[in-house]
Image (cartoon, grey):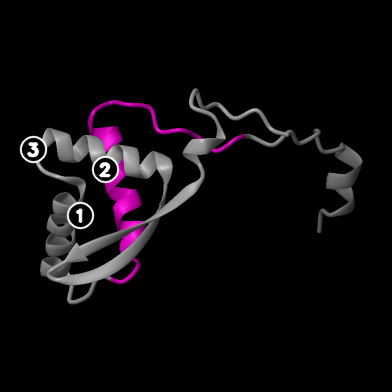
Amino acid sequence: MFKLDNPNGASQYESRQRSIRIHGVITSIRLENAMWDVLSAIAVERNCTTNALISRLYDELTASRSEASNFASFLRVTCVCHLVARGQRVPAPPRLHRPPVDADVNAAFAY
């Protein structure tokens, strides 16, 4: 098993689904626990609930685009941008160990 560079362990990578009401319509959003934590922190900074924050983000997205396709990805990118703007480290994906490529193998594929 890989050791991830994450002080909170693998639980941050697990996803959780929440039901959110946006303009009276109930929808489900599935995000990783780490993303829910960041959204909660943003909501605290803006003095609102996480659901209210998500509704505001939805409104901003649909104001700039006619639809909110792939809204969960939009929320993830919003979380990353929030962390980057505050100079916080964005977790990098784990690096896989790759053995050095033999020079003879490179020569065999040279055209």
- CA distance separating discs 1 and 2: 8 Å
Q: Amino acid at mark 2?
A: Leu
Left-right relation of 8 to 24: right
Q: Is residue 73 magenta?
A: yes
Give the position of the C terminus as an image quadrant: bottom right
Q: Magenta residues, as a range?
A: 69-94
Q: In what element is the residue under mark 1?
A: helix
The residue where tag 2 is placed is: 39
The quarter holding residue 5 reads: top right
Q: Amino acid at mark 1?
A: Ile
Q: Earlier in the sequence, mark 3 or mark 1?
A: 3
Determine crowd level at label 2: few under 14, some 14-19, many 20+ residues with C-alpha closer than 10 A: many
Q: Nearer the viewer, residue 40 or 74?
A: 40
Say which mark, if any, is on residue 47.
3
The quarter holding residue 26 reads: bottom left
Q: Is residue 93 magenta?
A: yes
Q: Earlier in the sequence, mark 2 or mark 3?
A: 2
Give the position of the N terminus as an image quadrant: top right
Say which mark, if any, is on residue 83.
none
Determine crowd level at label 3: few under 14, some 14-19, many 20+ residues with C-alpha closer than 10 A: few
- Give the image location of residue 96, x and y in percent: 69, 37
Q: Which residue is at a point 22% across and 75% down the rendered structure image?
A: 67
Q: Amino acid at mark 3?
A: Asn
Residue 1 in sight here: yes
Q: Are marks 1 and 2 in contact (CB under 8 Å)?
A: yes
The residue where tag 1 is placed is: 54
Q: Nearer the viewer, residue 94 or 10?
A: 10
- CA distance separating discs 2 and 3: 12 Å
Q: Nearer the viewer, residue 71 or 9?
A: 9
Q: Which residue is at a point 47% across and 50% down the rendered structure image?
A: 15
- Give the image location of residue 19, x and y in percent: 30, 61
Q: In the displayed structure, would residue 1 be above or below residue 65? A: above
